[in-house]
Amino acid sequence: MMFLSKKGIESQEEIIDLISKDGTVSEDRYKLHLKAWYLIGKFYNKVYSPDPEEQMYFTKKAVEYYGLIVSYCRLNTNASDFIPDGFKSSLDAKDLLERQIIAYQSRKDQDIKQKTEL
């Protein structure tokens, strides 16, 4: 799954690069950006690593891309029409993943504290 997710991320980043180089401003361009950000967020969310630190990296990247969608849609109210259900699912995924990051950091801090007390 990691290989497929990384390939998906790369392909969506290429699309964003191509769109950005175009330089035109249009509704279609924003639709493509939002869809690419959404897919990149989903791909990062699907990547699994047995290394907790690496997993947190992927989780934070997913939050970053979901956050781009949430921020953009909040600033441009009609933007959520470009990706039906994408705004809501991005908002929910971002919230859940942020909670996972906080829980992980809390466990990590607790482990460090216990080790220093020994």
Image (cartoon, helix red, strand yellow):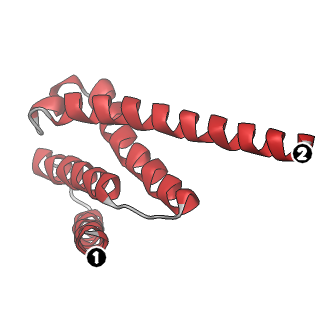
Chain-order first, disc 1 or disc 2: 1
Q: Residue at x 53, y 64 (%)?
A: 51
Q: Where 70 sits versus 28, above or below?
A: above
- Secondary structure category for the residue under label 1: helix
Q: Amino acid at mark 1?
A: Phe
Q: Where 110 sits versus 28, above or below?
A: above
Q: Where 81 sits versus 21, above or below?
A: above
Mark 1 residue crowding within 10 angstroms, few (<14) / some (14–19) / many (20+): few
Split into 4 quadrants, where in the image is the C terminus? top right
In the displayed structure image, the side of residue 115 where residue 58 appears, left or right: left
**Residue reaching furthest to the front:** 118
Q: Residue at x 48, y 57 (%)?
A: 55
In the displayed structure image, the side of residue 101 where residue 80 appears, left or right: left
Name the residue that disc number 2 marks.
116
Name the residue that disc number 1 marks.
3
Which residue occupies the foreground of this view, 27 or 84?
A: 84
